Amino acid sequence: MILAVVGGKGGVGKSTVAYNLGAELGAVVVDADLAMADLPADRGPDLHDVLAGRADPVEAVSEGGPVDLLPCGRSLAGARACDPTELVAAVEAVRDAYGRVVVDCPAGMCGDVGLGLLVADACVLVTEPAPAALGDALRARALARELDAGLAAIVLNRASEASPTDLVARELGGPVTTVPESAAVADAQAAGVPVAAHRPDAPAAAALADLAGTVERACGARSPVS
């Protein structure tokens, strides 16, 4: 299974969702934001090295942390040296070795987002209850449809009881999991660990576990919403 996590707008919590989904699903998380990597880095080879032909994608997976991760470099030189079109082959190689991959796609609508969706069996769309974020989410949803990446779930992040959950489900056309605004999420992110490992009693941890269950059911049935 290859799952792409996308969010049309930056800052909606996409990388946090991808990291926690990797933990819940027992998947390797690939940080595919080639220009603005946001997930924990390691000292070994990274995705920049893989896409520049300097490292094998499977050997670049770091297994030393709480989540197996293929990190991305943070240097401009590394981003310029890599060939983004090699991403599909790299992700497929990791899938073949590990079985499950979560791809943390870049924010926005750049071509790199399309590559992540192109290789994915399904996607999770992350947004928040703000007009700009929801507008960008609609555009990301349209791109997923064009590339035949079925929609496994929608995450309405930083949600409250007043958030328009039904409207989001209707407009984006998929099941919505609400993740509440929570200090536990920020604290876990600062510690570099999944929310469930840091604060298993937090409502956000339960919401992320529910999200993983939704993804499991969608991808297990091999028929995520198109």
Image (cartoon, helix red, strand yellow):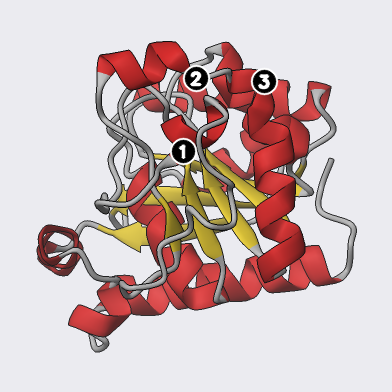
Helix or strand or loop: what does disc 2 sit on?
Answer: loop
Q: Residue 120 appears at what percent x and percent y?
A: 73, 43
Q: Label 3 belongs to which residue?
A: 85
Q: What's the mark number on residue 82?
A: 2
Residue furthest out toward the front:
54
The crowding category of the residue bearing disc 3, from other C-alpha atoms within 10 Å (few below 14, some 14 to 19, many at least 20), is few
Sooner in the amino-acid sequence: mark 3 or mark 1: 1
Q: Label 1 belongs to which residue?
A: 47
Quadrant (top left/top right/bottom left/bottom right) for the C terminus: top right
**Residue type beneath disc 2:** Cys
Q: Residue 206 appears at what percent x and percent y?
A: 38, 79
Q: What's the mark number on residue 198?
A: none
Q: Residue at x 46, y 38 (%)?
A: 47
Q: Say if mark 3 contacts mark 1, CB within 8 Å.
A: no
Q: Can residue 1 be seen from the camera position used here?
A: no
Q: Residue at x 61, y 76 (%)?
A: 213
**Image height of 122 relative to 67, above or below:** above
Q: Residue at x 71, y 22 (%)?
A: 142
Cα distance between the residues tagged 2 and 3: 9 Å
**Residue type beneath disc 3:** Thr
**Residue type beneath disc 1:** Leu
